[in-house]
Amino acid sequence: MKKTLLLLLFLGFGLQAQTEDEQQIRAIYDAALTEGKAYYWLNHLSNQIGGRLSGSVQAQQAVEYTKEQLDSLGLDRVWLQPVMVPKWVRGAPEFAYVETKPGLTTNVPICALGGSVATPEGGLKAQVVEVQGIEDLSKLGRENIEGKIVFYNRPMDPTLINTFQSYSGCVDQRYSGAAEAAKYGAVGVIVRSMTLRLDDYPHTGSMSYGDTPVEKRIPAAAISTKGAELLSTTLKLDPNINFYFRQNCRQFPDVQSYNVIGEIRGSEHPEEIMVVGGHLDSWDLGDGSHDDGAGCVQSMEVLHLFKKIGYRPKRTLRVVLFMNEENGLRGGNKYAEVAKSKNEQHVFALESDAGGFTPRGFSFDCDDANFERIQGWKKLFEPYLIHMFVRGGSGADIGPLKDEELVLAGLRPDSQRYFDHHHAENDTFEHVNKRELELGAATMASLVYLVDKYGTVPPRKIKG
Amino acid sequence: MKKTLLLLLFLGFGLQAQTEDEQQIRAIYDAALTEGKAYYWLNHLSNQIGGRLSGSVQAQQAVEYTKEQLDSLGLDRVWLQPVMVPKWVRGAPEFAYVETKPGLTTNVPICALGGSVATPEGGLKAQVVEVQGIEDLSKLGRENIEGKIVFYNRPMDPTLINTFQSYSGCVDQRYSGAAEAAKYGAVGVIVRSMTLRLDDYPHTGSMSYGDTPVEKRIPAAAISTKGAELLSTTLKLDPNINFYFRQNCRQFPDVQSYNVIGEIRGSEHPEEIMVVGGHLDSWDLGDGSHDDGAGCVQSMEVLHLFKKIGYRPKRTLRVVLFMNEENGLRGGNKYAEVAKSKNEQHVFALESDAGGFTPRGFSFDCDDANFERIQGWKKLFEPYLIHMFVRGGSGADIGPLKDEELVLAGLRPDSQRYFDHHHAENDTFEHVNKRELELGAATMASLVYLVDKYGTVPPRKIKG
């Protein structure tokens, strides 16, 4: 009889615990969908401030606005963490055309890649050699490249369901294309925009010259996918046509900026820190609504939702709005550097930097024991149609925190539309759906709630 | 040894069978994402034809266009199935205002509900009584309603994750609100638009007068959600304000129209018919891209994809583009009537009428044995992030086919954005994402492929 009673008590406890989690998560989603502030904040960031390139006035305004908003949430502490960031400025709008015969030109939409040097003041005109990737350069050799513009035209693979995979399969052209082409004497680089759509928006993004000496750096620009199709077709008809482009972007010395941080101190284990975050900087062409205004306001919302449902975390919960993810990662590196110098014990970090679309789940960068524990929570997410709990990368900004003690996670929203907007003029507020944004915030808050309640599995001590 | 060999053969067979399904489904998705015609067809339906209200010139153009496109696919048979449909015409744009003091007015966006009568020619002005639903009418009683406009203002519940549930919880106000209010002597009805957004688009939709005699029918219109908020707030300040609206919509006699049907004859069991379909008619305010241009072109695409991958179905595969789902369901009823009169054996019917958004799965209306078989296929869909295999409704147009011999299914796309556009002016082509549309078509085709290959479970014969 005693055994049965114990069993019943145990079952009853299990049932009640389950029910409490279900209730809290329901309360989180309800609050997000009816009293959420994420969309309101994003409206301000996008429409009152706009694109927030590192070192810009808008980036500084975003620092001030989000700090002020975090201040208003009644957190235990809100502060700015100083970090020096690069300042690259686009300058006057870029201009480009395809010239089939002298004086016979067709304009095409381009934009300078972030970090690129300018063209000569009067622009740059040269013949074009089209390649499907960096690996084509060595096949062509210097004799076919020298003095020409290299046109990288490998498109994103449309058959991959996860569009981030398609992006990964192409982005080397944008990031390293100029440095590699310069080795063969190219005078400039044009890269097909990283998007699956056929449209007129050029998509910018970071590039690096690696160890290319300053005097050998060549200008690099993205061309819209329709522009790329036009250029490619034209080249097939006549490989000797010219391409002209002009851009006067410029790198300035580093400037002072900040990560914006707010925290609710843990009631039982204040020394254990959980981070939720996104990056406050964005590219300059659109207003950075999806990349990554969405991730910032969702991260802020996690703390707001905890306040709304009256849940005080046992562990310290910190929102970090990282500065300069796009062209330097200085904010992410600085945050990790300070955390390590202070011997802070981070147990969990969750990043949202894949757009404000319907959430589908999370990817986790952690050990087996923690992944197993987390998978045990899957059922709690089913009513909210959250079904992806996979191993994989977490996010660029929390990456530098990586440590065996830490569970890293990334929100995984539906990825189909992300690269329609990514780094382009049409990454704007009207392309964010309020409910999708809110569901993402609620999904993040629910995971943080569970991590807070049940803790992470400490790493197995290796016997010395 | 023999046993081991048999086991190995069996395993080998299982492995190979699995692999063949995986390969075919991969081929279906690849073809949809690289050679699909769905988006191209939808562009024509939406931008060259536009809104396709039953009985309109556009509806007829859509019949002709889709028949012509099906003809070009090399199917075994394409035909038009005649069906008489109602013809309701909106007339001149509607007009409405809130009048707080004589002459002091604020215009608000409204649209006539489909099937509504007109207001008197000079419009209708009356005091307003706001209710949260039909059930409030009896509480208020005739003394508070007679001579007034009833304003139904119960919003869709934002906390439900499936927005179709929120819609179901409200739509009685639109469908039956006028018939019910007329019983209490109301002179008109204004209904809050069925959307979760706060915006300026009124959303139309069907309504019915039930058995209300013609002379007692009162005009009914939808008001945008922002208009509803304004009206409600104004009524709180002064319950005696007036509301004015004018609409001159009109019902004409039924006209001739058609379901558009195409089929690939089954190679082994031609008598077993599988249907995929959507509805070709739409409301008139937008261009009906999501509702249900998307479902039509996805259904056509299923047959096109089978052709592309070179898969000839064993059973007969039929695409049916139903006419008049929105305000009559005449096409769905006619199709089922003809099928029954010809003793056709339908084994499977799949409808897409929930928007061209990222597919999440299917809902099934079938017996346990078939549901169990289908659930066994879940793993094949995992690489495509298709995870919902639930019991539930299938679709309005295939509903009349219902029979114990038949598996009915509905595609379940992500529902968050659907009611932002449903029945409103902004249900337009630019709100359909090409990949999301294509993924839906591929998901449908994959299910049809499996049903074709493995068949459905015949109903258990009940011993007499």
Image (cartoon, coloured by chain):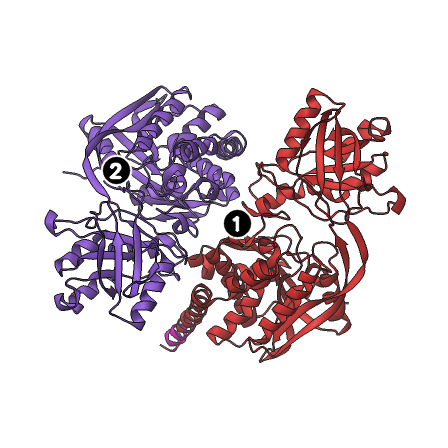
Chain colours: A purple, B red
Rendered position, A322 above or below A152: above
Amino acid type at image mark 2:
Pro
Residue at x 73%, y 49% (from the top left corner): B206
Please state which of residues A385 and A128 is positioned toward the viewer in this rendering.
A128
Rendered position, A207 above or below A13: below
Dot 2, crowdedness within 10 Å: few (<14), some or many (≥20)? few
Residue at x 73%, y 54% (from the top left corner): B327
Rendered position, B83 above or below B73: above
* Residue at mark 1: B414
Residue at x 65%, y 65% (from the top left corner): B61
Q: Is residue B294 left or right of residue A128?
A: right
**What span is colored magenta in the figure?**
B2-10
Q: How many marks?
A: 2
State the CA–CA distance, disc 2 to disc 1: 38 Å
Q: Chain of mark 2?
A: A
- Residue A40: % across, % down: 47, 31
Pair 2/1: label in front: 1
Identify the element where label 1 is drawn: loop
**Residue B452, image quadrant:** bottom right
Amino acid type at image mark 1:
Asp
**Residue A166, image quadrant:** bottom left
- Residue B309: % across, % down: 46, 73
